[in-house]
Amino acid sequence: MAILDSKIPKGPLAEKWTKYRSTVKLVNPANKRHLEIIVVGSGLAGASAAASLAELGYKVKVFCFQDSPRRAHSIAAQGGINAAKNYQNDGDSTYRLFYDTIKGGDFRAREANVYRLAEVSASIIDQCVAQGVPFARDYGGTLDNRSFGGVQVSRTFYARGQTGQQLLLGAYSALSRQIGKKQVKMYNRHEMLEVVMIDGKARGIIARDLVTGKLERHFGHAVVLATGGYGNVFFLSTNAMGCNVTANWKAYKKGAAFGNPCFTQIHPTCIPVSGDYQSKLTLMSESLRNDGRIWVPAKVGDKRKPVDIPDNERDYYLERRYPAFGNLVPRDVASRAAKQVCDEGKGVGPSGLAVYLDFRDSIKRLGKDVITARYGNLFEMYEKITGEDPYQTPMRIYPAVHYTMGGLWVDYNLMTTVQGLYALGECNFSDHGANRLGASALMQGLADGYYVIPYTIGDYLSGEILTKPIPTDHQAFAEAENNVKERIDKLLSIKGNQSVDDLHKRLGKVMWDYCGMARNEEGLLKAKKMVKEIREEFWKDVKVPGGAFEFNTELEKACRVADFLELGELMIDDALNRKESCGGHFREESATDKGEAKRDDANFAYVSAWEFQGDNQPAKLNKEPLIFEEIHLAERNYE
Amino acid sequence: MSDTINLTLKIWRQKDASSPGKFETFKLDGVSTHMSFLEMMDVLNEKLIKENKEPIAFDHDCREGICGMCSMYINGRAHGPLKGTTTCQLHMRHFHDGQTITIEPWRAKGFPVIKDLVVDRNAFEIIMQAGGFVSVNTGSPADANAILIPNPIAEEAMDGAACIGCGACVATCKNASAMLFVSAKVSQLALLPQGQVERAERVMNMVKAMDEAGFGNCTNTGACEAECPKEVSVSHIARLNREYLMANLKNR
Ligand SMILES: Cc1cc2nc3c(=O)[nH]c(=O)nc-3n(C[C@H](O)[C@H](O)[C@H](O)COP(=O)(O)OP(=O)(O)OC[C@H]3O[C@@H](n4cnc5c(N)ncnc54)[C@H](O)[C@@H]3O)c2cc1C
Ligand code: FES
């Protein structure tokens, strides 16, 4: 059985990390040179970790499936990154960021981890500036901030609407420097397809060279996964096309517990679906909610043009329902409210699955120039996609799958339940509980990579200094490679009638309909059956053209979708088990009279850590109780 | 405007780097004008798979115009006809019924073809590894506000930093020069106080790596700027040239 020892250091919350850092076991520089670390993923988490570990002297290998580490999906983050700098003198502090994150996550995250995150947040900004990240500046030359949903201070740092890009290019530049120094060996266009276990420890990976199709064996004293989120289980999401769960899933099948798989974030402001050819959904940054007002026609079936609908016939439903936070309520609340008004028939646009995000008033108040300066690139992007000009007519938006709070369960050291296997960034479950606040994922990815793993990995590797690199002709490598080979051969041999995308789209629709914004027992049970059926069909009827030893994008997709089809069922199991509503997880059976999510702390104040029991066996549920020493559990109220 | 159009697509097919390539022609009917260009390619690929033909390989990931992965040469223009737009952000409403669209990979000595429309851009990586960074280790740097950077300087640095590294500039340039790409990075770090210490060394190293990678010379045609999906300005090239000159003088 997986042992869920969170390894939280003793002592007062505010002193845990400092004390840990001063007492953690170290590896001396001479020994670091002999220790090899595999990092899978080159997004904010992976690139920052790899660069920092290489700077310390470890030998690092990095893998990513894109043709450059700079293209990891972190590049697409628009809005910004949080840090408790209190530069605006508006009452921010480490404690407030910690509190906001716990509350925003609906009290389903671990206090000690979140406190550490808030604590290191300020250093992240310093580090990024030192690298030359061009954050937005005021005229006096100091850094500028904006506010983001779910909080009442301005603590978000940004670089136009391209914050993720600039932060990733910073981490990528640090990584490139280490590649140039030969301290890191980079494997672009490589996909990890298996974890290699030797004597109960993670000792390497099997990766497929996506250009030649060749399977490769790589040894590491430790393996660090930083492989991002799995939102693409829904087919349509704001994630990049390649985002997947494969690395996580292989780890899960090797014994790493999967934490809170059903916790999914549905982002309220995305461009609505336009047709069944749709391949992905585009996020319109949450920062737009600072100046845009969200509304629908007050009357069902009002088909007038939005500009022709007078104010008294509009329903600014967020401002009405949540006067204190208005349009800036947290994402889960905003998304559900949009679904509710559309379910009532007030939705707009051709599909009726959209609401307006209107800049009329702020253009009047601040002038078009100010709005252009703030959101110009987003407005352009919107116009490119929809052909409509948001300066003239309100944007149409609808919620879309955006982020997965769930992921591999990790302890305070970011180690999974498999010895020597770590998970960083979006691919782990920590820090965000049941709902992530805007601008906190970038913070977490960089915290994990720059400031946590460089310390915590020493705790494990200090015990590995006598371990010689294991030659990859070891039996365990051969077996792992053979498993991958058999799976690929099987996929290619089916030669059925349905394309990978066909099956993926069907999976996505089931997940969205029954395990999306609102979930109930009946629907989930139905979905469980449907996912199983699609999975069985997949293995009988999928059609993967081409061969194994070539550049084969359909094969890449097939490998990923095969894993999504298993993950989907686990997400449903998790959603079924968690009978409460919390954060992004809304169980219709558990709502207040006003239709708000109702948590059940007495029965569900725990992390679900699912353990693999074998193919076609139900996963085993382990529970990590969440103990709140610092914070008083309260109902989340944004009214 | 009608909501669907019929198209003829002339697409470059090439098995791998060592095989010769050729154009293949496809008919695609009923293309929704609301689709993105890559969604149109998805539809074509699904059709090919159904017909037991091999789908067309192309690079893409974010489909939001920011990762720099998509890279199609459409009707003789990098990323197609729309200014300041990546292939993934281009929509079919900019094409008309009955149109023939020619789709090719980036063509440049520095970017060998991997398959069909996919090219190898590793040369860009090597250039970045040669100097596209500030040499600062993770640790405890000074407070971020200890370095004051006037807004206009930060903005100009950001203009260069906005480059997505897609390679459209190289594909467009008749000399297959990588100057716009290199200058965007050099310029960003030359403008910022953080970049000063390694300023001369950086430009020398990056230009050297660029030359070794087989990219051509810049003859100031300005084509790169016109086709850059992020509209990175050739003024960065002018800055790079000044930086290079000064670095050479200093080294003497
Ligand atoms: C459109 C969008 C906007 C966002 N905006 C914000 C924002 O404003 N603020 C904020 O805080 N957060 C934002 N987020 C969330 C945030 O961007 C992500 O959570 C975060 O960047 C994830 O970083 P990561 O390093 O964990 O993973 P990623 O950046 O996704 O990197 C994953 C890496 O893993 C590699 N990989 C994956 N699987 C494999 C495999 N099997 N083999 C080899 N390599 C593999 C990939 O190649 C990639 O390098 C946004 C997200 C999206 C989608
Ligand atoms: S796919 Fe990312 S820029 Fe086009």
Image: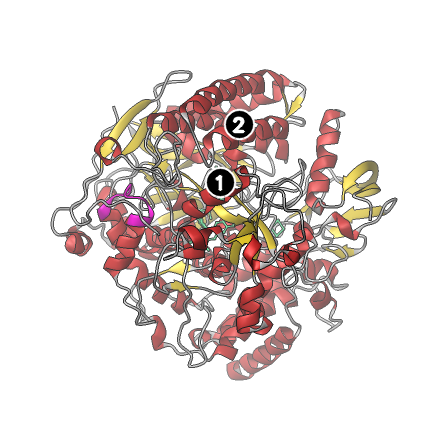
Amino acid tagged 2: Val
Q: Is residue B97 left or right of residue A51?
A: right
- Residue at 23% x, 47% y is A111
- Residue at 19% x, 47% y is A632
Residue A522 shows which numbered tag? none
- Residue B232 visible, this angle: yes
Q: How many marks?
A: 2
Name the quadrant containing residue A265.
top left
Residue A564 place in picture, x, y as percent? 49, 29
Residue holding disc 2? A510
Q: Is residue B163 left or right of residue B177?
A: left
Taking depth in this image into account, of B12 and A504 the one nearest to the observer is A504
Amino acid tagged 1: Gln
SS under mark 2: helix
Q: Is residue A159 magenta?
A: no
Residue A151 place in picture, x, y as percent? 35, 57
- Residue B159 visible, this angle: no
Magenta residues, as a range? A103-111
